[in-house]
Image (cartoon, rainbow, N blue to C red):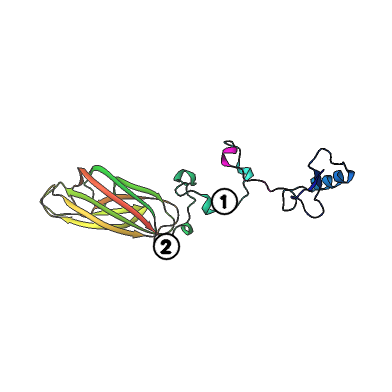
Amino acid sequence: MARTTATNFAGGLQFPYATAATDLFKKEDVQTLAQAVDQHTHATGLGLPIATVPASAIGTGIITSAMIADGTIDTVDLKDGAVTSAKILDGTIATGDIAVNAVSQWVTFQATVTFSTTTTAAWLASPASITMVTTGGRLVLEVSCVVSHSTGPSAVTYCGLIKDGTPMGNQAVMQNGVANQNITVCWVVSDQPTAASHTYQLGFYNATAGTFAVNAGVQVSMIATEYKR
């Protein structure tokens, strides 16, 4: 005959149990066991701890959002590269989310354009434009294109413009009397727009009489880069 006391309980809840069929039954054993079971929580002294559940034992889709406490997902819980653009709501990245001096947005646009005008000082819009959501940082626009005029021999002066509703910068070019002579125009415009959607369009106007054209087959390049300051 042998009797052993349970070792996984403490605080007076250590109930005895028999290790042989000849052990005598005691009503006190049942009472102590009932108390232990009543307070059983798997905490220290109240039963064995719950073993870690392996990932293989959890079916797909079992753990839902409602089972995850708000504010408990830490950086270490996210795999590097796991958060993609599709998981970020458009327009929700604020200035405070971007490190100082980091490039927050940039766009490059290239298009083949051909158009002309004979009207002096008339805005002539180009198909080249950039629409971007700015965050209130410093914006730098770089423009390059090749232009020419189709009349001669008088000189023609024309200006390249960047507009965001109103002109924000220009590059004046005077071309002499050689008709259809190409001139490369490159300039940089700096701006600090409000945090909103903006459309920057490349255009031109004639400062003197004459026909002005952006030649067919010419590439117009616009690069808009926003920096946080």
Q: Nearer the viewer, residue 134 or 20?
A: 20
Give the residue number, with chain letter if any, for mark 2.
100
Answer whether residue 54 is magenta in the image.
yes
Q: Position of residue 125 (x, y in %)?
A: 29, 47
> Taking 118 as reference, is 181 left or right?
left
| Type of the residue with mark 2 | Val
| Type of the residue with mark 1 | Ile
Task: Provide the residue span drawn in magenta.
Answer: 48-58
Q: CA distance from mark 2 to mark 1?
A: 26 Å
Q: Is residue 144 in view?
A: yes
Residue at x-position 84% and y-position 41%: 23
Please identify the dominant SS of the magenta region. Answer: loop
Which class describes the residues within 10 Å of circle 1: few (<14), some (14-19), or many (20+)?
A: few
Q: Nearer the viewer, residue 163 or 27?
A: 27
> Taking 171 as reference, is 191 left or right?
right
Q: Nearer the viewer, residue 83 or 29?
A: 29
Specify the label residue 150 is tagged with. none
Q: Is residue 126 in view?
A: no
Give the residue number, with chain letter if any, for mark 1.
73
Q: Which mark is first along the chain, 1 or 2?
A: 1
Q: Position of residue 106 (x, y in %)?
A: 36, 52
Image quadrant in which the N terminus is located: top right
Which class describes the residues within 10 Å of circle 2: few (<14), some (14-19), or many (20+)?
A: few
